[in-house]
Amino acid sequence: MTLIGAAYAADSAGHGGGGTGLPDPMHQFEIQRIIPLEIFGYDASFTNSALFMMIAAVLITVFIVFAMRKGEMVPNRSQSVAELSYQFVANMVRDNVGTDGMKYFPFIFTLFLFVLVLNMLGMMPYSFTVTSHIIVTFALAAFVFIGVTLIGFWKHGIGFLKFFVPSGVPFIMLPLLVVIEVISYLTRPVSLSVRLFANMMAGHTMLKVFGSFVVALGLLGGWAALAFMVAFTGLEILVAFLQAYVFAILTCIYLNDALHMH
Amino acid sequence: MEAEAAKLIGAGLASIALVGAGVGIGTIFGNYLQGALRNPSAAPGQFANLLLGFALAEATGLFGLVVALIILFVF
């Protein structure tokens, strides 16, 4: 039930109030059980969220394997798309972490493609946006946060704690600044996850609200709202890419902090 | 005051956070254009930073929006 979270509460609340006649914009985030399943008292049902995650994973794997099956010197169309995405993420890692960060490249490449494909699948009408649920994005962000912190301690030992002590600061200011640094470090997974989740949820809610305006205004006035819809859909596709990019690049920046300590 | 009315007012107040996001995004794109027109050859190199700054600024406003939605739908 925790998986269902805010959207479930939103849905049950949305049906009660209102009375405006417009469709409930939160309904699209509802998680439905496709195959009900209970393991040791936990609800482990196969939901539409799990279905779209599996579609994304299968889609990425099939595409990359299909595109690179021949590996020609002069790439064809699908191979150049795969190589382009590889180059894009590889440059991102190299620029932000450095060459010694390239051993974490597979993780960041996977993360970027997974979030990107989930966001893009969500842009299809009547599909489900997995990343519009805070629990999904928080799980990803917490994984990044814990992993990066462990890398920092593994690389620098207990000396990683120096990361929280800014250099060139008067001694008397240190207790305050260390507390601020620790708090800002601990809010990283929250900001990383809420950024992705809020962007996705706000965007899809907005699209739904404007979509209901098109229907409500009818044949005569609906065109203006429809034009807005087209523009906003373009913007949302941009945001879907941008948020995947930002998620990956912030992971790179955090990784760089852990590996090189400022 | 009724609790329902207070909730609606609170959600509206929380949405004011989007003002800051608007100012931030405007500043980022404005300053990028200013810098890009002064030194066009350096502009493409900073495009990634532009997008990063845009996303970071937009996210702070959306945090406020999330607070509004939580007030409206969770409580």
Image (cartoon, grey):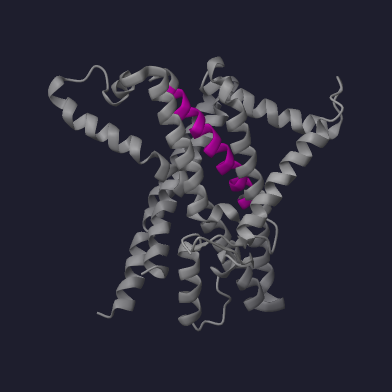
Q: Residue at x 74, y 45 (%)?
A: A59
Q: Residue at x 48, y 39 (%)?
A: A143
Number of marks in the image? 0
In screen coordinates, is A28 left or right of B21?
Answer: right
Q: Nearer the viewer, residue A34 or A190?
A: A34
Q: Quadrant of residue A242?
A: top right
Name the spot of residue A72 as percent of width and height, x first: 87, 23
Name the spot of residue A236 as percent of width and height, x first: 61, 52
Against A146, residue A51 (above or below) is below
Residue B55 colored in magenta in the image: no
Whether residue B33 appears in this view of the structure is no
User: Which residues, given as a range, are shown in magenta?
Assistant: A236-258
Q: State whether the magenta stretch is mostly helix, strand or loop.
A: helix
In screen coordinates, is A100 left or right of B68?
Answer: right
Name the spot of residue A14 as percent of width and height, x first: 49, 75
Whether residue A81 appears in this view of the structure is yes
Q: Residue at x 53, y 57 (%)?
A: A201
Against A48, residue B5 (above or below) is below
Q: Nearer the viewer, residue A4 or B28?
A: A4
Quadrant of the image containing the C terminus of chain A? top left
Q: Nearer the viewer, residue A211 or A81?
A: A81
Which residue in the rendered view is the most extreme toward the front?
A: A40
Residue A251 colored in magenta in the image: yes
Name the spot of residue A239 as percent of width and height, x first: 58, 47
Which residue in the rendered view is the most extreme toward the left?
A: A172
Q: Quadrant of residue B24?
A: top left
Q: Nearer the viewer, residue A238 or A99?
A: A99
